[in-house]
Image (cartoon, rainbow, N blue to C red):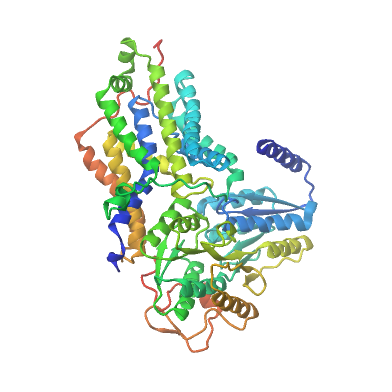
Amino acid sequence: MDLSAISPTLLIASLMVAATPLLLAAIGELVVEKAGVLNLGVEGMMIVGAVCGFAVSVETGSPYLGILAAMAGGAILSMLFAFLTQFALANQVASGLALTLFGLGLSALMGQSYVGIKPPAMGTVDIPVLSDLPVVGPILFGHDIVLYMGLGLTAAVWATLKFTRAGLILRAVGENHEAAHALGYHVVRVRILAILFGGACAGLGGAYISLIRVPQWTEGMTAGIGWIALALVVFASWKPWRVLLGAYLFGGINVLQLNLQAAGIAIPVEYLAMSPYLITILVLVILSADKSAAPASLGRPFHASH
Amino acid sequence: MKFTKLLATAAVAMGLATTAMAEKTKVGFIYVGPVGDGGWTYEHDQGRKAVVEAFGDDVETVYQENVPEGADAERAITQMALQGADLIFTTSFGYMDPTINVAKKFPNVKFEHATGYKTAENVSVYSARFYEGRAVQGHIAGKMTESNIIGYIASFPIPEVIRGINSAYIHAKKVNPDVQFKIIWAYTWFDPAKEADAAKALIEQGADVILQHTDSTAPQAAAQAAGNVITFGQASDMAEYAPFPRVSSIIDNWGPYYVARTKAVMDGTWETANTWDGIGPGMVGIGEISDHVPADVKAEAMDMVAKLASGEYHAFTGPINKQDGTPWLAEGETADDGTLAGMNFYVEGIEGSIPN
């Protein structure tokens, strides 16, 4: 056993990378659920984003275009969900599950000719003096741009929901869609925008895995992160900063358990392997003791004639 | 274009399904990962293609990808047997019991299970002596490491994987007494994100050589990003990462075996067998050692490959002690296949314990 082999600085830097796909997908889903829509298709939108981003950055040679394509891919797939649930008034749970299955199959088809190819590398942000600082440099100033986007997005979602009129309308639609409708807000339009935002975020999260974290394309490579994002939103009581905390906790313990294994810690591997799930759930359950409730209209269909 | 090609393939497949004649030999393959994993499953699918090439219209091959090990495998294998397969290759260790169970229900279907040890009237097992390739890797790794830390991404604690760790360690230690192995059990054969994280964790702890017993190329990509870490291709050549970080590889070559066994079924000469072939018969190939490896190390490695192939040298040659210090092999003694097949212990010098 040799704990000194684990460098806290590198550990924190790599946990931020490991947590980012989860954070992005969960922040998107949080907005969707705040608008009163339950989209279980996160996993499907992530994987489609992953393959779209990968394909476009390989074809164009630009990781940034890939990132944009991933967001577009996720959003386009979510439009299918929006159409089914907002116009056809289909059941949201069933539609979301279908979206995940569809996305997994579609991505496998789209990605057939991209297996085993290396994508163009996305550079890290390199700020002359700051990135070279001893501990702070690698943690705060040595990452790629998408990671900072994730953090920025969390702050933006929090501020928008809390302080702006748009955020208030979104929450009103999610809490009581009939009242919002009576006040003259276009419930369906707000929800569609929220669903598209969620799709774009999930797509971005997927592309982070295929373009930056791994980076390569393989079928099913999101490996359940979308489902963890869904659970995270609930356990975080629909609060953006708690989503961030949960994502970093999950990513952190995941990275830590690998490091502990490599350092030869005498804890059975099985316990280490399940620890990220257990600890994340435990911490967030304790935090959610303040009884924050789900948006009241979550999962209920709305039609102006009702 | 891809899509039309796919449609065409589907149309052809449906045409075949309806017009298939009884005398066609149907060969099924159960895969643990996608055929495009670039590693283990990819090579099995190359073997399947070799069968198609060898017999053309006399065979029909079917395969199913991403079949989880365990109970669901039984369903997949049963389905393949019900579809009329005459010979089914189940290509992962975890399919062992499901294969045996299904084989009992279909006595007329022949089964071939990779890397397992349970045989039956209609079940053969086959595997390759990957540990011979691991010995070569260990030698190169021990010579090339500067930090003296070698990272090893292990999959599941089964004999095949433990054998690989031991073989690599023995040969790394032989040329570099200060070498230390850091082992991460990933509990997966194929999960690129997890493999990438494991590789990064090992690199952050000072490893400058990464050996992997998982099937994706993600650790190669992580090593490439780190810039000063070497790797070895696993199961497949992974040549897209050569000459650096990938300096060599173990290549599984299943084609000749699959062709021979399919032929045996066609001729009615198929019998239960327990095949375990290594570098000599060509079931294990050593991918080209790249120029990143110094010439003298490369020559030594090539020499070892030749000796392993001819049988002059055995990868487990004593004196070797077990991890707890008890003697296992005496001076000059070589390990017997029975012990190797069920290997469940580390050799002396490896730190940590094998998970249960």
Q: Is residue B150 above or below residue A50?
A: below
Residue B108 versus residue A301: which sits nearer the camera? A301
Which image quadrant: the N terminus of chain B? top right
Residue plotted at (58% across, 71% down) = B129
Residue found at the far front of this picture: A128
Q: Is residue B166 above or below residue A41?
A: below
A127 sits to left or right of B121: left
Q: Is residue A223 visible?
A: no
Q: Looking at the picture, how far across and down is residue A116, in whole percent?
A: 57, 51
Q: How many marks?
A: 0
Residue plotted at (48% across, 75% down) = B143
Residue found at the far bottom of this picture: B331
Q: Looking at the picture, how far across and down is residue A91, in whole percent?
A: 45, 25
Residue B139 versus residue A40: which sits nearer the camera? B139
B245 sits to left or right of B125: left
Which image quadrant: the C terminus of chain B? bottom left
Residue A227 versus residue A77: which sits nearer the camera? A77
Q: Is residue A24 above or below residue B100?
A: above
Residue plotted at (54% across, 67% down) = B292
Quarter location, residue B20: top right
Q: Is residue B5 visible?
A: yes
Quarter location, residue B41: bottom right
Q: Looking at the picture, how far across and down is residue A221, in whole percent?
A: 49, 46
Residue found at the far left of this picture: A290
Q: Looking at the picture, how far across and down is residue A268, in whole percent?
A: 34, 63
Q: Is residue A262 above or below residue A140?
A: below
